[in-house]
Amino acid sequence: MLQPETTRFAPSPTGPLHRGHAYAALLAHSAARETGGRFVVRMEDLDPKRCAARHEAGILEDLNWLGLRWDGPVSRQSERFTLYNAALDSLTRRGLVYPCFCTRGAIAREIAGLAAAPQGPDGPLYPGTCRQLTASEREARLAEGAAHALRLDIGLAVQRLPVGELCFEETGQGPAGEKGLITAQPALLGDLVLGRKDLGVSYHLAVVVDDADQGVSLVTRGNDLHSAAHVQRLLQALLGLPVPRYRHHPLIRNPAGQRLAKRDHAQTLAALREAGVTPEEICRQSGLG
């Protein structure tokens, strides 16, 4: 008998859904229903400047049109800062977080001046400039009211990990064909930002707190986020959170081979609906019908 899975679809309400989103939602819904589990919907609306209620309403309309039904009320990250702040405070009290006063421009200039900048899966990593500040230098900058982000000291965090190998289970397939039990590479994204004045907390911190709080047992998402699993596994270990299994999937692409994206004005589900496309056709095209 299959173990009941709790899955989630967690879009950012910054625009309408396209076929790529439909595939992700259908896959998560199918994984839950096939095992007699739960499917939850979460709005990742941390950025108030980009997120809008009209986009959330459109997303829910699209999900209903696809025939998807979710368990429990829709959750919103904008209403969950108490949980996120508690997690961030826990890491801060243990000395695993430091203030970073660098602007994006300053970081870019420093990286450009390095002979060999540290690299991550998406390009150069933060070189750790503010990690080198003394306690008194940090206190002075904070006393001045200098704008800053909060970064995870990745080297120290790895030192504080419990004894044993840090792993996660991949039941789908990563971009390089990764499957099975995968050894996490916690430093893959460097000293990542966990908190910012404008957004409060980062995606990585919020998502591990949310998945644990909502009992998500299987995370289904595009394999462009496979590298995120490595650092999220680290945060789960540091915060003592349960570890879900992951099912990463290939991205849906247009005829030119480009991944579908809101910023490129990919054809929306609403436009497809108006053109007479049926939910059954979307399911068949996704290979889930």
Image (cartoon, rainbow, N blue to C red):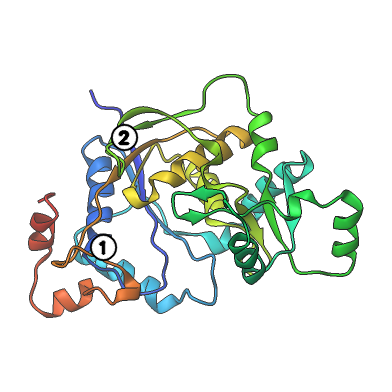
Q: Residues within 10 Å of mark 2 (few under 14, many from 20)?
A: some
Picture quadrant of residue 19 = bottom left
Give residue 163's position: percent from left, percent from top.
61, 19
Residue under circle 2? 178
| Residue 187 as seen in the image, left or right of residue 15 | right
Tag on residue 259?
Answer: 1
Extreme residue in the top direction = 164
Q: Up-down: is 13 above or below 224?
A: below
Q: Inspect the image, locate mark 1, and give the three-letter code of the amino acid beneath it.
A: Arg
| Residue 195 as seen in the image, left or right of residue 23 | right
Label 2: which secondary element: loop
Tag on residue 275?
Answer: none
Residue plotted at (25% across, 41% down): 31
Label 1: which secondary element: loop
Query: Is there a contact, CB below 8 Å, between mark 1 and mark 2?
Result: no
Residue plotted at (91% across, 61% down): 140
The tag earlier along the polypeptide, 1 or 2, is 2
Extreme residue in the front direction = 115
Residue plotted at (12% across, 63% down): 279
Foreground of the two, 15 or 134: 134
Picture quadrant of residue 271 = bottom left
